[in-house]
Image: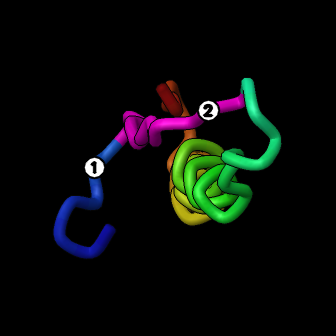
Amino acid sequence: MTKYPTIDSVFLNAGIMLPTDMTDPEKFDLPSFYKQMHINFTSHVALTHAFLPYLTKKGGDTSLI
């Protein structure tokens, strides 16, 4: 925010898709599932948490996309 103080939109675009075989419980890789969920969901929450104070303080139209 120091380098680009006029930012008014943040594009939340992160995601991976790891190969998953859910037809056989023995082959299901729970750590890979957690990694995928962490990147695909938690990273968006973390980015929103980081940028939201700046966007709300700015006033006017801002967005998280």
Q: Earlier in the sequence, mark 1 or mark 2?
A: 1
| Left or right: 24 in relation to 32 | right
Q: Quadrant of the N terminus?
A: bottom left
Q: The residue under label 2 is which amino acid type?
A: Asp
Horizontal side of 59 relative to 41 (left or right) equals left
Eye-nearest disc, 1 or 2: 2
User: Residue 45, relative to residue 21: is it above or below?
Assistant: below
Residue 61 in view here = yes
**Residue with the mark numbered 2:** 21
* Residue numbers of the magenta segment: 8-22
Residue at the spot 56% in from the left edge and 43% down from the top edge: 40
Number of residues whose C-alpha sits closer than 10 Å to that of mark 2, classed few (under 14), some (14–19) or many (20 or more): few
Separation of residues labelled 1 and 2 (CA atoms):
45 Å
Asked if residue 16 lies in the magenta stretch, the reply is: yes
Kindly identify which residue carries mark 1. 6
Q: What kind of secondary structure does the magenta stretch mostly adopt?
A: loop
Examine the rendering and report whether any part of residue 57 can be seen: no
- Percent of width and height locating residue 42: 66, 55
Q: Could you tell whether 58 is left or right of 10 in the image?
A: right
- Asked whether 18 or 42 is in front, the reply is 18
